[in-house]
Image: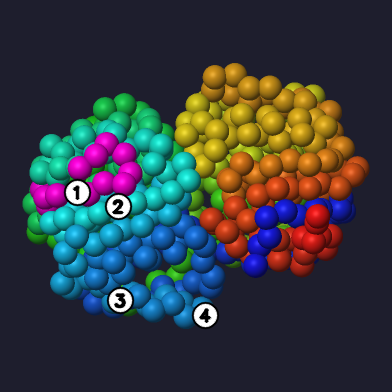
Amino acid sequence: MITDRVSINPTALRGSIAAIPSKSDAHRLLIASALADRPTKLIMRGGSEDISATIGCLRAMGAHIEQREDCVVVNPVTVPEYTPLLDCGESGSTLRFMLPVSAAVCKRAAFTGRGRLPQRPIGELCGAMSEGGVSFSADHLPFETNGKLRGGVYRLPGGISSQYITGMLLALPCTGEDSEIILTDTLRSAAYVDITLGVMERFGVEVRRTDSGFFIPGGQRYVSPGEVEVDGDWSNGAFILCMGAIGGSVTVTGLHPDSPQGDRAIVELLRRMGANVSVDGSSVTVTPGKLTGCEIDIDATPDLLPALAAVAAFAEGDTYFVNGARLRIKESDRLTACAQLLRDLGGAAEETADSLIVHGTGLTGGGTHGHNDHRMVMAAAIAAVGCTEPVTIRGAEAVGKSYPGFFEDYRLLGGIISDNIE
C-alpha cells in the first residue's frame, strides 16, 4: 500500500531492477486482443491504475479478462453490452483510445473519469467522430455517445495528442470500410503511433502510410497471434536510470534497444548530459559522470522531462528543455510543476510558455508535493539521491497510476524511505 507521504534519506543507489510492463504497449495490446477473433494471452507481470482502467472499460464492453500473476488472458468482445459505463479513471490514453473503439463496436456508451481527465483535450477527436456518425451528450466528461462510428475520411491534428490518431487507428478496422486519417498538422510524439502500428501488424491488420497520414483498407479484422509478450517500459525505466546518473550504479533489465518506444532516447540523452551509460542486450546500466547542461528538445519525448529535470539540477551550467508546451496538459502542468519541485528542494529553475530552464545549482532537500502526478512523484524521489538533506513527498500515492511498485524497487536499490510521517 502506497502512503500519502514519504520521506527519503539521500543515498546513492546500486543494483538491478527488471523493467515493468510498458503501459503504452499494454493499452494497445489489450484493446487489440478484445477486438480479436479468439483469446489472447499477454505475458506481463504487474500492472498499474491506467492499465486497470483500460481493462475495466473492455470488461464493461463485454470482454472477459482474467488477470494472473504473470499474464493477462483476454477473451474478446463477442456480443457488445448495451450502453456500457466506461470509467477511464485518470487515464488520458484510456479515454482517447476507448472513445472511438467503443463507438466502432457499441451503438451507445457512457464515459466518466476523474482528476484532471475531464479537463484534458478531446474536442478535436470528438469533432471528427461526430462527422463519422457519433453524437455526444456533453462536451466534457461525464457524457454518453450515441451512434456507431463509420469508415471514411477523418481529418485530425497531430500536434495536440498522438492518442487521437491511435484511437482512430485502433477503431477503424472494426467498421469494415475503407478509411483514411489525414493529418492537418505535424504529428508529435510519432513514436507512440509507431507502437500502435506495430501492435496492429501483430494482429494481422494492415495500415498504409500516405503522404498525408494513414489509409486503413476495409474488410479487415484483428486476428489473435495467441500469445504476446508486453514490451518493457522505457518511460518508467528512465526514472530508475536517471537515479544512476545522479549517484550510485543502477541497471534496468528488459529494455529492448529496438523497441518502438520513443523514450528509449533516454540512453543518448543521459550520455549527452555526461552520464556513463552502457547497454548490454536488453540491460542498461548508468553510473555518474561529469554532468553538463545542454539543450534538449522534449517535443518527441515529453514524459522524460520530469526525470531529466532532476538530473539537470546536478549538472554544471544551465539545461534548456524546449518545445514542451504540451506538458501543460498532462496529469499536471509539468512545466510549472517541475520548476516548483526544483525550487522546493533548494534548486533554481524557471519556465517560459513552452520551455523549462534548469540551473545546475544542486539540491539540498526539503518538502515538495507530487501534484497528483505519478511522474512528478518519481522525479522528486530521483532528486533525493543527490540531496544533502531528506526529501519529503506529499501525494506519493500518485505513482500507482503507472508504477505501483516504484518505492519497493527504490528500496531494493538501497533507498532509505520512511512512510510513517506525522
Query: What SS does tag 4 mark?
Result: loop
Amino acid type, residue under disc 4 in the picture: Glu
Verify whether residue 114 appears in magenta. no
Which sits in the foreground, 16 or 102? 102
In this orientation, does residue 148 appear?
yes
Identify the residue under disc 1. 145
> Residue at the location (41% across, 60% down)?
53
Residue mark closest to the camera, 4 vs 2: 2
Q: Residue at point 58% right, 45% down?
A: 373
Please, what is the three-letter code of the amino acid marked with disc 1? Thr
Image marks 3 and 4: residues in contact by CB distance under 8 Å: no
Decide which of tag 3 and tag 1 comes sooner along the chain. 3
Report, in whole angstroms, how far the alpha carbon at label 1 lies from the one at label 4: 35 Å
Look at the picture and state if 57 lies above or below 235.
below
CA distance for labels 2 and 1? 8 Å
**Residue in the image at 71% along x and 66% along y:** 408
Q: Element at badge 2? A: strand
- For the C terminus, give its image quadrant: bottom right
